Amino acid sequence: MQVQRSLRRLISLGFAASLTIAACASNDGELDAVSTDDPSATAAAVIEPATTLAALTPTPTTSTTAAATISTPNTSTSPATTAAATAAESDAGPDESDIGSDDLTLDASATLTDGSVADVAASASEVADRIGEQIELQTPVFDIGSSVEGRPIVAERLGTVGGRKVLIIGVIHGNEDAGIQIVDELRQRAIDDGVELWLIESMNPDGVARQDRHNANEVDLNRNFPHKWGPIGSPGNSQYAGTGPASEPETQVIVQFITLLRPDIAIWYHQDANLIIPSTGRDGRIRARYAELTALPLAECCGGGGVFTGIAATWARNELKKDSDAVPFIVELPGGVLSGALVDAHASAVLTIAVEG
């Protein structure tokens, strides 16, 4: 256990301890695309440092959290129609995106972070130990951290410990919460041998409670991850990226958890574009299989342009490719409450790709 604890501390120091990240240029010069519902907004030219990783205190629990109420259909988003910048093909996979109303220009003088860590907070080692010990102790349900307003972010483990790790995150944007229905269904399913299924109902519980895209600091968490983070807008803008890379406690929790867990497949649910972005290789095969099982189109998103920065799935792909061919991707669900048939299809698709790999 002492050796494992030391290893976790080294991982924490190397990957996700403090996220006080210096502004540094991306090596490949690629911009992931982004859109907003505030066409007048402009990105700041200077990247402010992120706040130091807060001390998190995951607390083991013995019961699942109650599912949030599913909202009425989400009709506030539409595909972007003009490109703020030409998006180059990513070295880590296809662009990941979600739909906004209009494009937001990223200032050409702004540099993007590469997700590296510049400093280490003492509390980060404690976070790694606490989360890591719960994983090792095979705890079925435990708090991995909390939101701005103190709501718990809970991880649940089902299936075979030591099997293929598959992570499902039901909600990242609080008003796109139909993924909770799929998480609820997966809780009721038998899990095949050889699959270690992890469920996080919502990484944005404050947003779900408010039925707001953002967290309680008005940050779009899917613009706040540390790989290729860029300064976007200000509070009140739909795609506001925060004060710095991984400035938000919810982002910090997920960065730490994924860095330690090293899932083989990870899915984030969004609404309401009703598609999966295609890819190549193993990534493309798994996406295509999921799309086939759920009758979702494989299609490009958001008008084929713009600048997408700080995306959760893109960060995860960049982090996990260091030692695996893991497949993190976004599933864009249709708007509103899902029918029982759709919930069943998506839950079955998760379990199918978990077995097939």
Image (cartoon, rainbow, N blue to C red):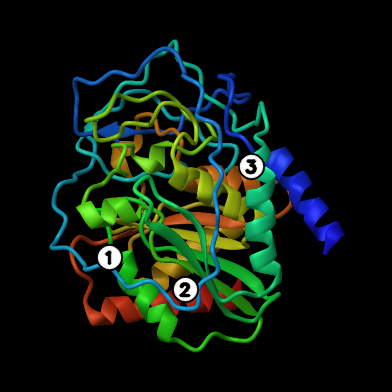
Instruction: For marks 3 and 1, give the one nearer the viewer.
Output: 3
Looking at the rendered image, the quarter that the N terminus falls into is bottom right
Instruction: Tally the marks.
Output: 3
Left or right: where 185 falls relative to 335: right
Q: Which residue is drawn at the image coordinates 55% and 59% (left, top)?
A: 58
Residue receiving disc 3:
123
Q: Which residue is drawn at the image coordinates 71% and 69% (left, top)?
A: 136
Residue 170 found in image quarter: bottom left
> Looking at the image, is mark 2 or mark 3 earlier in the sequence?
3
The disc at residue 178 is 1
Question: Gap between marks 2 and 3, in whole Å?
Answer: 35 Å
Residue 344 found in image quarter: bottom left
Q: Residues within 10 Å of mark 3 (few under 14, many from 20)?
A: some
* x and y, in percent, of residue 217 in the image: 32, 37
Residue 336 found in image quarter: bottom left
Q: Secondary structure at mark 1?
A: loop
Instruction: For marks 2 and 3, give the one nearer the viewer.
Output: 3
Q: Which residue is drawn at the image coordinates 31% and 71% (left, top)?
A: 67
Q: Secondary structure at mark 2?
A: helix
Q: Residues within 10 Å of mark 2 (few under 14, many from 20)?
A: many
Q: Secondary structure at mark 3?
A: helix
* Cβ atoms under marks 3 and 1 closer than 8 Å: no
Going by the numbered disc 2, the residue's amino acid type is Val
The disc at residue 350 is 2
